[in-house]
Image (tube, rainbow, N blue to C red):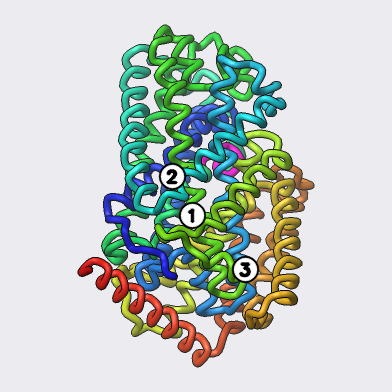
Amino acid sequence: MELKRGISTSGILFASVSATIGSGWLFGSLYASKMAGPAAILSWLIGAVAIIIIALCFSELSTMFPVSGGMSIFPQLTHGNLVSFMLGWISWLAFIVIVPIEVLAVIQYAANFFPDLMLKDKLTASGYVLAFFLTAFLLLINVTSAKFMSKTSFYITIWKIFIPCLLIVLFFYKSSHFENLTSHGFAPNGMHGIFASLSIGGIILAYNGFQPGVALAGETKNPQKSIPIAIIGSMLICMVIYCLLQLAFILAIPPELLGQGWDKLTFPGEAGPFAGLATVIGIAWFGMILYSDALISPFGSGIVFMASSARASYSMSKSGQMPMMFQKLSKNGVPVLGLIVSFIVSLLIFAFLDNWQEMAAFYAAAICLCNAVIPVTLYVLRKDFPNLPRPFKVFNYRIVSFLAFYISSMLLFWSGWNIMLKLSVIIVIGFFSLILIRKFSNQTFSFDLLGFSWLLFYMLSLGVVTYHGTYDGGSGAIKNGVDFLLIAIICFVSLILATKFKLSKEKSNIAINKTIQELQNERKKYSNQQVA
């Protein structure tokens, strides 16, 4: 049974915007300000430009092959199953991590009224119970059907865009302390603070909502039109909102609260930053609206990312990288088993990652590793198969591909060694899982070790540089500036290796034709369903 193509252009655009405007804006402005000071505004701009460049690569590939869970399918066409599995495994977990991130955001805001839910920034026993029921509610919405999920996201997104825009207007009107931009230095922690805030401060988490546009590609009515609009359009909309929110946050802070500097910033109700600040500047009534928004905004993202994680496991199952049972769909065309597994894993994550910021940093590292592979795949496909139909074509693919690869690598590096170590453990667990699946499954699966060699070199060398870097647990042996050069060299060598160690053209051509044939069959089935 195949996934239904029932999501329109507006549906997938609103799903992407809904995924993007989650808890990132509710917490990101505070954490980014503490790390970068007023220069956090630059952090949001840099993050937007970086993600748009990366998203261009996704747009070309996802319009060529609009399949659900596409992130793991793309590298399978050029470098085989092992690279594909690693990407699918990491992206699957990254999508799932968003669910507890958004649920925790809801609970953290609610803890201002019900203190028993959290102790400092960690859940209590009653908090865990509420987390269970909120996550179960997300599961219930997704099980109904993809079309209902899309419609639900539409109405939630209208609310999610309206509230931040209203906040910007009210904060600018009520309190504009322009002296905050320079009183303690525009960038008190220099470029280090700006770069660190991208990964650790929640900015990359906030911007990566374009990923569901790729994961849900196989369920759009007109993917060639819908996907570029959803991916690039959602980024532009959210960039404007996020930058204005950060500026409004900085200007609204009473100067006396900055007496000890940006990194020591604290105020009543800080657990819900914007709502607490609204009360401080005298618009407590709006603070109450923000508390209600803290329930709706994260829930919208949670709905979309739980759906995306289930589509990722569905796609991996079709590739023989997960048991075949993950391909079973409900009568509504929904991968229910994938949703149930996502629900269970979400609950486990609450036990292993302590707080919102740690979850956000892990997600940023995981998704940046996935993002790094996609432009390499685009580069190889353009080089080896220049005549394939491309509804959306990236200009000057050599420059854009390398730039996207380099940007993703720097973002991964800036997440720091502590997060990189945890990500490495997850990758090892994934490979052991693959070995077990291969041993006990009837599905045929070749590892394609040659195609994986470039990625192994990339991950090991980047890990060494991160360990000796200056970010979050690094030894500090490699100073700022030198790290830029070393990672550029790693990316350049990795790209050369990726063009040398890959699937043969014949094998890639077979995989590409098979994928195209499957897409044509799905479109025929969808057309027949529409006629019927």
Q: Residues within 10 Å of mark 1 (few under 14, many from 20)?
A: many
Is residue 198 shown in magenta?
yes
Is residue 478 shown in magenta?
no
- Look at the image and tell me whether residue 402 can be seen: no
Residue 405, given in percent of the width and then of the height, sits at 52, 63
Name which residue type carries label 1.
Answer: Ser
Residue 466, given in percent of the width and then of the height, sits at 71, 53
Label ID, residue 308:
1
For residue 176, what is the image quadrant? top left
User: Mark 3 touching mark 2, by CB under 8 A?
Assistant: no
User: Which stretch appears magenta?
Assistant: 196-203
Residue beneath the point at 58% across and 52% down: 340
Q: Going from the N terminus, do you reach mark 3 or mark 2 first?
A: 2
Residue beneath the point at 44% across and 70% down: 1
Residue 406, given in percent of the width and then of the height, sits at 54, 61
> In whole angstroms, how far apart are the C-alphas of marks 3 and 2?
26 Å
Q: Going from the N terminus, do you reach mark 2 or mark 1 first?
A: 2
- Position of 443 compared to 431: left or right? left
Name which residue type carries label 3.
Answer: Met
Q: Residues within 10 Å of mark 3 (few under 14, many from 20)?
A: many
Mark 3 vs mark 2, foreground winner is: 3
Residue beneath the point at 48% across and 9% down: 280
Mark 2 vs mark 1, foreground winner is: 1
> In whole angstroms, how far apart are the C-alphas of marks 2 and 1?
10 Å
Q: 351 or 168, which is in the foreground? A: 351
Label ID, residue 322:
3
Secondary element type, mark 3? loop
Q: Which residue is mark 2?
A: 19
User: Mark 2 touching mark 1, by CB under 8 A?
Assistant: yes
